[in-house]
Image (tube, rainbow, N blue to C red):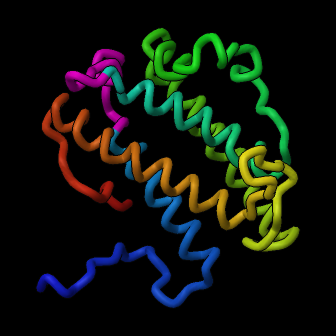
Amino acid sequence: MTSFEVEVPADTPLAGSEAAVLLTTLERMRALVEWKCSGLDAEGLRATLAPSTVTLGGLLKHLAAVEDSHFLRLMRDEKPGAPWDTVDWDADPDWDWRTAADDTPEELFALWRAAVQRSRVLVAELLAEGGLDLVGTFVSSRTGESPSLRFAVVSMIEEYARHAGHADLIRESVDGLVGEDPPRD
């Protein structure tokens, strides 16, 4: 590959609709983070890479919280349910990161996978209602605007992409696993 060629994952629709490209990218980011976090015991999910306190377990719990709040909040202006509804986020803004060490790998993955599934269902409903141009009911106090579904999806991709880099570094420090693409079935 020359410096001018772009390597595109096989499952990316090169001429697909905007929604197909964005959702495929989001699913690829989800799969990458899942792969980087999978196969580890509790100790592996608690490992840090100094000076950061970020762990793979914390990353999973944080992304579950973001999945559960992001689309619901931006598009429906609703707050998520348990376990997030009992947290005093003002008093403990890092609750998701901090408490992940108390959860088993199975609990963390179950929490994250359930949140991802709820997001998939909600995004499918929202696409059917109005596509990527659908405007949510949340009103930003900063701008007075409400976000579109397009903004919400891109924002979620950004969240995963940011944390995928953390996952790369931490996982490599735990057991040497490197790579950009999880193995395909």
Residue 46 is a magenta residue: yes
Residue 1's spot in the image, x, y percent? Answer: 13, 83
**Could you say where residue 45 lies in the image, as x and y percent from the top left?**
34, 23
Measured from the top left, where is residue 145 in percent x and y?
Answer: 79, 58
Q: Is residue 9 above or below residue 13?
A: above
User: Where on the picture, by quarter, is residue 50?
Assistant: top left
Q: Is residue 89 above or below residue 19?
A: above
Q: Is residue 109 magenta?
A: no
The image position of residue 32, as x and y in percent, is 38, 51
Labels in figure, total: 0
Which one is nearer the viewer's eye here, 72 or 90?
Answer: 90
Q: What residue is rendered at 25% in x and 33% in y?
A: 170
Q: Please say whether residue 41 is visible from this viewpoint.
A: no
Instruction: Name which residue lies at 74% across and 53% down.
Output: 143
- Residue range highlighted in magenta: 37-52
Which residue corresponds to the image point at 28% horizontal and 22% vertical from the top-left? 44
Q: Is residue 3 left or right of residue 136?
A: left
Decide if residue 169 is on the left or right side of residue 13: left
The C terminus lies in quadrant: bottom left
- Secondary structure predominantly adopted by residues drawn in magenta: loop
Relative to residue 117, is residue 4 depicted above or below? below
Q: Residue at x 26, y 81 (%)?
A: 6
Judge whether residue 138 can be spotted in this image.
yes
**In the current view of this chain or complex, which residue is farthest to the bottom?**
15
